[in-house]
């Protein structure tokens, strides 16, 4: 049953959808960004140096550093060492005060009595002294956060397609709230990473329900709008987070400030609807009927008195067909995404691009605080630069299509990141190129989930998107390690991420265009959406029992990308070979497979 056709009768984007999207689904996107990046500031590095108890009586910080801390060259500038000190008899130094000279040939040794931290903020780094030989511990925390995300996404796919979109959201909201609040009461580093692993279990899976529900409640022409609105809400969440982390400098208070406000979302338990598209795909017509009637009523649509009766009859008639009965009665699994050639190829390509996008988006967001300058301002800019992309992204997706928009966004962002190698000693230029790269990956991150949701069939859409995002989450596991290397070579992470973006942008050209196409419902529908390996037009698919070759030709031509024009000139009598003329007046023949 074509749900998009039903939406034409009850409203594709009427008052009902607007109320649900604007007041329920968009706010529900915000917790994902908060919990994904708050940990950067909970475990941010605090300026520190070796503690020298014998010199505390001097009450002059600059003098203490000059006497006890050697200078080291870092990123082209001399800075006080954070892990080493001079080995001196500081009792004698104090006895000779004020006739004190800065040591020149003194032996340099690691810190002997701990560290002194700046006092303007408290993080897990300063509280548990995660510095020097333990400076990898905060990076390990980010890695485990990502590992939790992989496991959570894998399970979430089954929850979403088995129990529904709505129950899955509240299950993950409960988990996120419990572990988020517990984080504030961690007594040591090891308990803290266990709690952060629990929070990571819900990131980014908790964002999937608002996103999937939004695109499944509206018609094909409104899916782009809902996707952009969801990403605007996410970007605004990052900007709001930058204000929260600036105001809340204690990591325990920050854990509560980024969790407690979202308890209000449990009030959505009543107004948030289940996806009627999913209900119909799972054979739950009665529940879908209730939502459709409510949708039509609030949208002001007048349905015939017997509309639902006829709709039920058509639905039951479709269920009697053997192939659809088989599709609806069996359980779906990951193997269904790989059983048929076209769907298998699309799954592999989508997953690869998802990996590159997730790696680079998370990597650039993680990298913002260490670019130099004010870490809070950098993170704020990383969120703000996402907003202008949506001004041209919407018309671009509607005119150029999903595929070319995705390709150009990734390639432009990748080139900007790669260019930082040429200006690595120019901090302001590097920051500007970083912002361009962030804009490019932000655009790609909008297009990819939309395009993937339009390519995966409804019966496995949640599973397919979860599989791609789960494998994509392998990126955030290794990307903190890449950024960790950036402490010595600042532009190295940007070069690696730029190369990934360019490769993903090229791969996106192998996917078919989905602009204004009906969402595939069954696995058979998903297989029919051909893989566009010719960078232009897809060969027409011969349908069983078709008698109109002319209609097939016209349909194939209309499905071409907006950048490509083609004209059918001949179809052989055998209906096995289709010959077309491309825009360069060259013949191209496609073999139509049954």
Image (cartoon, rainbow, N blue to C red):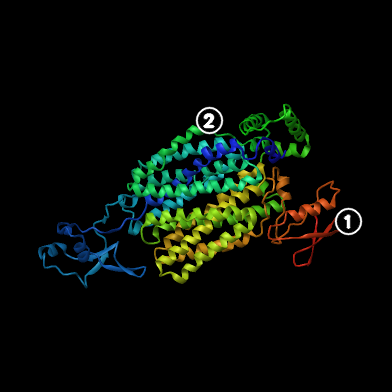
Q: Nearer the viewer, residue 328 or 379?
A: 379
Q: Nearer the viewer, residue 102 or 443?
A: 443
Q: Which mark is residue 574?
A: 1
Using residue 42 as the reference point, say whether residue 540 is left or right of it: right
Q: Nearer the viewer, residue 322 or 517?
A: 517
User: Of the residues tagged 1 and 2, which is closer to the observer?
Assistant: 2
State whether residue 537 is above or below residue 418: above
**Marker count (numbered):** 2
- The reply to whether callout 1 and callout 2 are in contact (CB within 8 Å) is no
State whether residue 567 is above or below residue 315: below
Residue 198 percent coordinates (x, y)? 45, 43
The residue singled out by tag 2 in the image is 270
Residue 282 percent coordinates (x, y)? 66, 36
Q: Residue furthest bottom?
A: 105
Residue 572 percent coordinates (x, y)? 87, 58
> Residue drawn 37% across and 56% down?
375
Mark 1 or mark 2: whose residue is earlier in sequence: 2
Considering the numbered disc 1 on the image, is that residue within a helix, a strand or a loop? Answer: loop
Considering the numbered disc 2 on the image, is that residue within a helix, a strand or a loop? Answer: loop
Q: Which mark is residue 279?
A: none
């Amino acid at each position: 049953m074509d749900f998009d056709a039903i939406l034409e009768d009850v409203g594709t984007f009427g008052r009902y959808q607007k109320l649900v999207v604007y007041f329920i689904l968009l706010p529900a996107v915000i917790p994902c960004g908060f919990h994904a990046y708050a940990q950067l500031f909970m475990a941010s590095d605090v300026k520190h140096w070796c503690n020298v108890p014998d010199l505390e009586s001097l009450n002059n910080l600059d003098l203490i550093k000059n006497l006890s801390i050697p200078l080291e060259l870092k990123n082209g500038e001399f800075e006080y060492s954070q892990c080493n000190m001079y080995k001196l008899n500081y009792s004698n130094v104090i006895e000779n005060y004020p006739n004190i000279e800065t040591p020149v040939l003194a032996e340099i040794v690691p810190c002997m009595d701990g560290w002194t931290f700046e006092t303007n903020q408290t993080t897990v780094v300063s509280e548990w002294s995660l510095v020097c030989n333990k400076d990898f511990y905060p990076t390990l925390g980010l890695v485990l956060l990502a590992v939790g995300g992989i496991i959570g996404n894998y399970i979430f796919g089954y929850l979403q397609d088995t129990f529904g979109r709505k129950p899955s959201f509240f299950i993950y909201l409960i988990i996120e709230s419990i572990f988020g609040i517990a984080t504030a009461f961690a007594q040591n580093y090891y308990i803290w990473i266990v709690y952060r692993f629990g929070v990571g279990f819900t990131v980014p899976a908790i964002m999937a329900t608002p996103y999937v529900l939004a695109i499944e409640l509206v018609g094909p022409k409104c899916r782009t709008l809902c996707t952009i609105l969801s990403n605007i809400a996410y970007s605004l969440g990052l900007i709001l987070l930058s204000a929260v982390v600036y105001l809340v400098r204690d990591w325990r208070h920050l854990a509560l400030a980024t969790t407690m406000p979202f308890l209000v979302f449990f009030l959505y338990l009543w107004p948030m609807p289940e996806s009627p598209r999913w209900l119909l795909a799972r054979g739950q017509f009665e529940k879908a009927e209730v939502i459709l009637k409510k949708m039509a009523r609030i949208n002001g649509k007048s349905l015939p008195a017997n509309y639902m009766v006829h709709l039920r009859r058509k639905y039951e008639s479709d269920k009697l067909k053997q192939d659809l009965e088989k599709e609806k009665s069996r359980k779906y699994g990951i193997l269904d995404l790989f059983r048929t050639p076209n769907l298998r190829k699309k799954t592999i390509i989508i997953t690869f691009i998802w990996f590159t996008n997730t790696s680079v988006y998370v990597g650039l967001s993680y990298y913002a605080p260490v670019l130099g300058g004010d870490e809070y301002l950098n993170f704020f800019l990383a969120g703000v630069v996402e907003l202008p992309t949506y001004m041209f992204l919407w018309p671009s997706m509607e005119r150029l299509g999903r595929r070319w928009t995705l390709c150009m966004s990734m390639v432009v962002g990748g080139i900007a990141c790669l260019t930082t190698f040429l200006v690595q000693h120019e901090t302001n230029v590097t920051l500007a190129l970083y912002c361009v790269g962030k804009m490019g990956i932000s655009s790609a991150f909008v297009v990819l989930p939309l395009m993937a949701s339009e390519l995966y069939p409804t019966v496995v859409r949640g599973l397919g998107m979860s599989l791609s995002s789960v494998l994509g989450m392998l990126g955030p596991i290794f990307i903190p390690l890449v950024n960790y290397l950036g402490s010595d070579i600042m532009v190295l992470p940007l070069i690696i991420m730029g190369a990934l973006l360019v490769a993903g942008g090229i791969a996106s050209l192998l996917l078919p265009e989905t602009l204004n196409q009906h969402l595939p419902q069954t696995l058979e529908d998903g297989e029919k959406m051909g893989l566009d390996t010719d960078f232009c037009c897809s060969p027409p698919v011969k349908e069983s029992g078709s008698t109109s070759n002319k209609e097939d030709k016209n349909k194939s031509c209309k499905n071409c990308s907006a950048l490509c024009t083609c004209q059918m000139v001949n179809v052989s009598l055998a209906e096995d070979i289709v010959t077309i003329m491309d825009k360069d007046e060259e013949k191209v023949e496609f073999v139509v497979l049954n």
